[in-house]
């Protein structure tokens, strides 16, 4: 036997036994996006490496060590997308959408990061996200946060997630804060770990993100970004907070929340959970007013978030609010040679006559006993039996599988009526 080939490390099949949970999640996502009039955008999974370098910033974890980057046959550097904001911006610029007024987009699909795989952290994982272009005021912040909250409600996990919020101010205020921070950390250089010492020049805000227990006291005493903010930025943030309060959306202001990416300005936020161990962030985002210009578009404000689908599904599963996989309504047994051929046509007629019907047929024949076993295993509510005698008098024998009721012979019309009733009774 030749050697088996398996999936790459950190990349997973979504098995047929698991996919219904994904589909249910995707249906909720579509419903919520539609409730806010966001339109879906699908971009390629491969892009020019420069797109991510320029948008995320060269000194970010993603660009420094997580991207799947290749030289292709044309000797260009290309990368599997590690996130999708840059691609959405690229697309809007490329197709001239920024000239047509504000735009609300959403997307969903696989992202790729070369990280150490563990529970809730994979090399191919999935994100659903929104991006809104052309909105300068904090009402759009409120909108996308409310949208997220509505989705958690619909998924039944709102009680397990909390919202953390912060503001980074304008690019200038952030730059001024950066100076203050570099001065502070330089004065305490000996207390910095290796990673943080390296970030001191390249990405000092990211030091605040450090989980190193030995540095927590140093971080707690660090100058606060809030003190570098001008009045306009403060008012902006307070306006958002007031809107959230009046909508009853809970949040916690976390001054150390800076997010790893260079492009954020003003509002940044994360939804986190305590139920998934170290992988606590399920959704993260913020405003990126400089990014579109940075990628060659006309200056346009932008904001968005991305959620990790696998982490949300783990959370849904942990909360026991998962949905059962859909089972066929009926299983068609075909007994004998004639039925094997003619029965398949009957199955087509049933599917024509009963919209929404989930009908599984026995293909390949077999004894009554073995077919009945499969019917039972399929989870169907009804076994439909077609053999020579049914074909002779134009009937189908109908046997309830999940309740103690006698089987009976039905005409085609009686059968379709019964099946329509079953389909209609579904929630
Ligand atoms: P983390 O701190 O967990 O590494 P991140 O800040 O790198 O997260 P973002 O780039 O903000 O994550 O991506 C948004 C969301 O995508 C995260 O909150 C998380 O739910 C999910 N996510 C990010 N990286 C992974 C991964 N490797 N595997 C699974 N989900 C991920
Ligand atoms: Mg990460």
Image (spheres, rainbow, N blue to C red):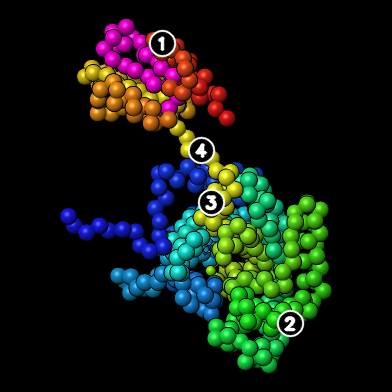
The reply to whether callout 3 and callout 2 are in contact (CB within 8 Å) is no
Mark 1 burial class by Cα count in 10 Å: few <14, some 14-19, many 20+:
few
Residue closest to the eye, 89 or 349: 349
Residue 259 vs 163, above or below: the answer is below
Distance from Cα at disc 4 to Cα at disc 1: 29 Å
Badge 4 or badge 2: first in the primary sequence: 2
Q: CA distance from mark 1 to mark 3?
A: 43 Å
Q: Tell me the residue at 39%/21% (across/down).
A: 383
Mark 3 vs mark 2: which is more N-terminal? 2
The residue at which mark 2 appears reads as: 221
Alpha-carbon span between mark 3 and mark 4: 14 Å
Residue at point 58%, 72% (across, down): 261
**Residue 400 in the image, given as x and y percentages of width and height:** 44, 19
> What residue does disc 3 label?
313
| Residue 184 shown in magenta | no
Task: Tell me if residue 197 comes above or below residue 403 in the rendering.
Answer: below
Could you give the CA–CA distance between mark 3 and mark 2, rounded to whole angstroms? 37 Å
Q: Callout 3: 10 Å neighbours few (<14), some, many (20+)?
A: some
For this orientation, the residue located farthest to the top is 393
Region of the chain picked out in magenta, as a range: 380-400
Residue corresponding to mark 1: 408
Task: Give the residue pinned by disc 4.
Answer: 324
Alpha carbon separation for disc pair 2 and 1: 79 Å
Say whether residue 206 is visible: no
Where residue 120 sits in the image (x, y, percent)? 51, 60
């Amino acid at each position: 036997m030749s050697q088996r080939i398996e999936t790459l490390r950190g990349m997973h099949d979504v098995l047929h036994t698991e996919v219904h949970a994904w589909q249910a999640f995707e249906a909720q996502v579509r419903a919520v996006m539609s409730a806010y009039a966001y339109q879906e955008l699908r971009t390629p999974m491969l892009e020019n490496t420069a797109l991510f370098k320029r948008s995320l910033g060269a000194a970010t974890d993603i660009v420094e060590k997580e991207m799947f980057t290749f030289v292709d046959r044309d000797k260009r550097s290309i990368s599997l997308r590690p996130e999708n904001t840059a691609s959405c911006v690229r697309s809007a610029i490329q197709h001239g959408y920024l000239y047509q007024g504000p735009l609300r987009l959403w997307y969903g699909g696989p992202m790729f990061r070369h990280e150490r795989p563990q529970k809730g952290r994979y090399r191919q994982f999935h994100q659903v996200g929104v991006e809104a272009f052309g909105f300068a005021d904090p009402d759009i912040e409120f909108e996308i946060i409310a949208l997220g909250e509505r989705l958690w409600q619909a998924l039944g996990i709102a009680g397990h997630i909390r919202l953390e919020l912060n503001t980074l101010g304008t690019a200038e205020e952030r730059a001024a804060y950066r100076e203050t921070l570099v001065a502070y950390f330089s004065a305490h250089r000996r207390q910095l770990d290796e990673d943080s010492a390296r970030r001191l020049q390249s990405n000092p805000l990211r030091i605040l993100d450090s989980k190193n227990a030995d540095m927590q006291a140093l971080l707690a005493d660090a100058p606060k970004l809030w003190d570098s903010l001008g009045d306009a930025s403060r008012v902006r943030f307070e306006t958002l907070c007031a809107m959230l309060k009046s909508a009853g959306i809970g949040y916690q202001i976390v001054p150390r929340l800076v997010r790893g990416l260079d492009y954020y300005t003003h509002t940044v936020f994360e939804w986190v959970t305590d139920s998934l161990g170290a992988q606590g962030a399920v959704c993260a985002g913020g405003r990126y007013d400089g990014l579109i210009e940075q990628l060659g578009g006309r200056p346009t404000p932008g904001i968005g978030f991305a959620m990790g689908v696998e982490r949300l599904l783990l959370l849904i599963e942990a909360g026991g609010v998962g949905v059962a996989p859909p089972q066929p309504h009926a299983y068609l047994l075909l007994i004998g040679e004639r039925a094997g051929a003619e029965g398949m046509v009957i199955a087509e007629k049933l599917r024509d006559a009963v919209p929404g019907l989930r009908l599984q047929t026995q293909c390949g024949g077999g004894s009554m006993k073995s077919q009945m076993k499969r019917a039972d295993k399929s989870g169907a509510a009804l076994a439909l039996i077609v053999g020579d005698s049914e074909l002779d008098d134009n009937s189908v024998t109908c046997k309830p599988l999940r309740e103690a009721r006698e089987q009976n012979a039905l005409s085609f019309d009686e059968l379709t009526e019964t099946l329509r009733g079953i389909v209609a009774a579904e929630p």
